[in-house]
Structure formats: structure tokens, C-alpha cells
Amino acid sequence: MTWRIRFHPRVARDLDSIVQWILDYAGPDIAARKLAEIEATIATLKDTPHKGSLRDDIAPGLRAIPAGRKAVIAFVVDDAAAEVLIYAVTYGGADWAQRSMRRRKERR
């Protein structure tokens, strides 16, 4: 079974910020490579949505997985809808837990 991937509306901003930060710091080749790592990790959730650390201590059903060495993807799995909702993508130590909790409280 292949699961559908959905993104919280603010994830696009997360990715733009990550790319801009890496562009400024390390240049376009590294930024493109890091973004590809993040996208590849997200794509794996289509086939294995329940991987990663379950973080019920932060929010019910919240999971987190690393993408490369410095990125974290925070998401929940909706088994009934066969869907993965990406709440946040962070990089370089940004507080993915806090960002995910805030976004879960917002309307999807």
C-alpha cells in the first residue's frame, strides 16, 4: 500500500528557509543536495509511514525522523485515511517539537 503525503501549509516556508540558510552558508550545490536528502526521506514515508520515533510525550501520534545529518521531519500518520501529514521540517537544531505542537493546534 502506498500512503498519501500531505504537508502543513507552513512546510513550504520551512523548506524555503532551510534552502536559503544553506545557500548563504555553503552555496547552491550543497543547498540542492540537502533539499534532495529531505525530499527523499519524505518520499520513503509513502511506503513506510510508521517509522521514526513516536513522540506522544510532545503530541499524540507525533513522529520524528532525521533527514541527512541536520534535518528533522515531524509528522503524524492517519491510518484510516492512509495519509501522512508532515507538520514541520527543521534544520540545524531548530525546535521541531515546539513548531509541530503549534501547527497541530492550527486548522489543517
Image: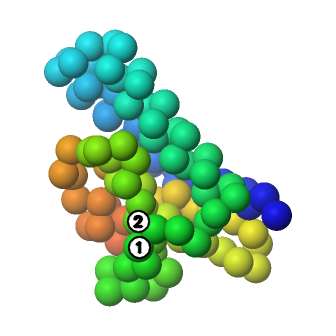
Residue 65 in percent (x, y) is at: 41, 60
- From the image, tell me which residue sits under label 2: 64
Taking the spot 27% from the left edge, 19% from the top edge, the residue there is 23
Say left or right for 31 vs 27.
right
Q: Quadrant of the C terminus?
A: bottom right
Up-down: is 72 above or below 20?
below
Give the SS element for disc 2: strand
Residue 46 in percent (x, y) is at: 68, 56
Taking the spot 43% from the left edge, 31% from the top edge, the residue there is 35
As drawn, the label of residue 77 is none
Say left or right for 46 vs 51.
right
Taking the spot 41% from the left edge, 25% from the top edge, the residue there is 33
- From the image, tell me which residue sits under label 1: 53
Mark 1 neighbour density, 10 Å: few (under 14) some (14–19) many (20 or more): few
In this orientation, does residue 74 appear? yes
Kindly report the distance in space between the C-alpha atoms of the residues bearing marks 1 and 2: 5 Å
Residue 14 in percent (x, y) is at: 38, 42
In this orientation, does residue 106 appear? no
Question: Circles 1 and 2: CB distance less than 8 Å?
Answer: yes
Q: Where, by quadrant of the figure, is residue 56 drawn?
A: bottom left
Q: Quadrant of the N terminus?
A: bottom right
Taking the spot 38% from the left edge, 79% from the top edge, the residue there is 55
